[in-house]
Image (cartoon, coloured by chain):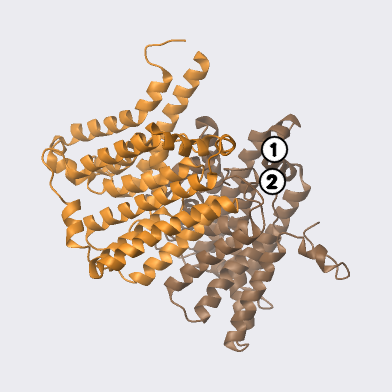
Amino acid sequence: MNTVAAPTRSPLARFATRPWIWSFIGALAVWVATIVFTGGKGAGEILSVALTFSSFFVIVGVGQMFVITTGPGNVDLSIPANIALSGALAMILMDGSNGMILAGLVAAVLCGVAIGCFNYILIRTLQIPPIIATLSASFIIQSIAIAYGRGLKIKPPPLLTDLVQAHILSVPLLALFVLALSVGLAFVLNRTLYGRAVTAVGQNPRAAELAGISVGRTRFLTYVLSAALAGLCGAMLAAFSGGASLNMGEEYLLASIAVVVIGGSSVAGGDSNVPGIWGASLFMYLLVTMLNTFGVGAGVRLVATGVIIIAVITIAGGKSSGRG
Amino acid sequence: MTRFVSPRVIRALLPALSMAVLLVAIFVIQPRAMSYFGLNLMLNLALPIAFATMAQLCVITVNDLDLSIGSFVSFCACVGATFLNDTPLLGVAVLVGCVGVYAAVGALIHLRNLPSIVVTLGMSFVWLGCSVLLLPTPGGTAPAWLIAIVKFKTPLIPFAILASIALALIVHAGLMKSAAGAVLRGSGGNPQAIARAGWSLLRTKVTMFALAGCFGVLAGLSLVGMTTSADANIALRYTLLSIAGVILGGGEFVGGRVSPIGAVLGALTLALAGSLLSFMQISPDWQIGAQGAILIVVLALRTLVNRAEARAA
């Protein structure tokens, strides 16, 4: 797999050509700055917490990455609404009982699959840009989530909460699970027919079509994949935070797009990598941690986050055109 | 192929038609809404949405998308409720500076060929952060003159409607009927052609982003004039509403195809959707869903018209 780090003997230059390396360097720099500030205290804890929270970013980020890979204009804006609805659905179905965990998780993913199908039906039948299609869909999904999940006070099953918050040798179990998931998805992207089709469609849909790839089917599967991952994230997030809340997906719209870009994937599509999603997610979370450690207020933290996103894209981007 | 009503005309009439349908439905359910007072009540928050939609339209014209307009409008509202009231000169300077920042963002996007959604996404954090710094808790007071303007009682027709009509006509004249407007739209439709003909694409992009900034400022000020106090999250939903408004109004995502009059109608339609629901005694939970449904229905109708056109051709 080409996502495995190069052997130590190979020149550093070869390593630096990987588009995702910068996100890891950024994450490392931010982490070092934080522990220098704290005088070395809590370095491990910070990393452990960062791994947990980054895992949520990674789940939705990889889905968004697949969507963005399919070409300019493809983006899934329904992720936050999806997270809210799937999370609520999972909590209601599980109803706090350990026996229903699997059923709840499956239901959340199926809810995502249904949303993905709905998104694609809108894109296809109305022939509208995906941004508008997923936006309109998210309006409706959000309303359903509000009407269905208002005042929901169901606690997640204790076993699931324990699992999501468990650590193995101080590495969060959740991070290991998401790591396995992302390795699997990296394999799908780089080594399977479907994954190659996603990249081909993103590079040139017409050429892909002429080469015998069904562009419509590829895009359909991609929107379903992204939505299914968002559904899974919704259930996990609800389990992690002690119940579903309506606004728990809010920050994932910006985050899912930002991690794709910072991770070195092309916003114009056709060129993506999964490791970058991890690097960027860690970077995003560690950045917030660093600013918190420095004791800056919420306002400065937001401004700094925005400026850094723009700085990263200004330095790293600029090769590809298109709105993305 | 000559027909009595061409698909083109139908498409142009769609925004007006959808708003008319909504208004008729409201008047049927609640006849008392058909009055100066009723319209004023339903539409008083429509003006800021119309301004924000116009800002989004400027950006969409040059093939970009502004995901920061909601937080920008919030920031302008916060400035309106703080600096503009306490130290008017500083307030004006800040707002002018904001327009400058918008122009700079346009220049950055053009010069580095960056994806606008990511840059404006970053800017949305910046504006939100600035608003939080300015007003950590909801508060502030709008200047009395601003409140007086926004709540001005015009005879016969409510101020919000008159202002919206004026906005639509002014932008229509500037963007759709003038030579400069043709160049600006052209830079979205066929950038290469515009560049080869000797116009600066940088200048068109900066102009459109600066205009978007101006409309954003107007949206913030009209909003704070209405609410009289502000908070950092006051207009965050405008980002999505403004995109929906432009598309509802017949704008297309690429190619500089936009319609200022349609966009204002689209904004008013979205604003009215909430009133219709409350008259139908449907829970406000469904308000945003209804806006999505309206969007989908109108887009479906447009697709039907397009198909009819393709068949006729």
Mark 2 residue type = Gly
Give the total of numbered labels.
2
Mark 1 residue type = Asn
Q: Is residue B222 visible to the viewer in this orientation of the structure?
A: yes
Q: Kindly state the secondary structure of the residue where label 1 is placed.
A: loop
Which residue is nearer to you in this view: B237 or A93? Answer: B237
The residue to which callout 2 is attached is: A270
Left or right of B124, for residue A180: right
Circle 2 Cα neighbour tier, 10 Å, few/some/many (<14 / 14–19 / ≥20): many
Callout 1 touching callout 2 (CB < 8 Å): yes
User: Furthest-right residue in view?
Assistant: A9
Compared to B4, does A107 lie above or below? below
- Measuring from the top left, give residue A59's x and y in whole percent: 61, 58
Compared to A69, does A166 lie above or below? below
Q: Are marks 1 and 2 on the same chain?
A: yes
Which residue is nearer to you in this view: A267 or A154? Answer: A267
Compared to B83, does B3 lie above or below? above
Apparent colour of chain B: orange
Residue drawn at 63 percent across, 43 percent down: A71
User: Furthest-left residue in view?
Assistant: B155
- Measuring from the top left, give residue A96's x and y in whole percent: 48, 63
Q: Is residue A252 visible to the viewer in this orientation of the structure?
A: no
The residue to which callout 1 is attached is: A204
- Measuring from the top left, give residue A150's x and y in whole percent: 36, 56
Apparent colour of chain A: brown
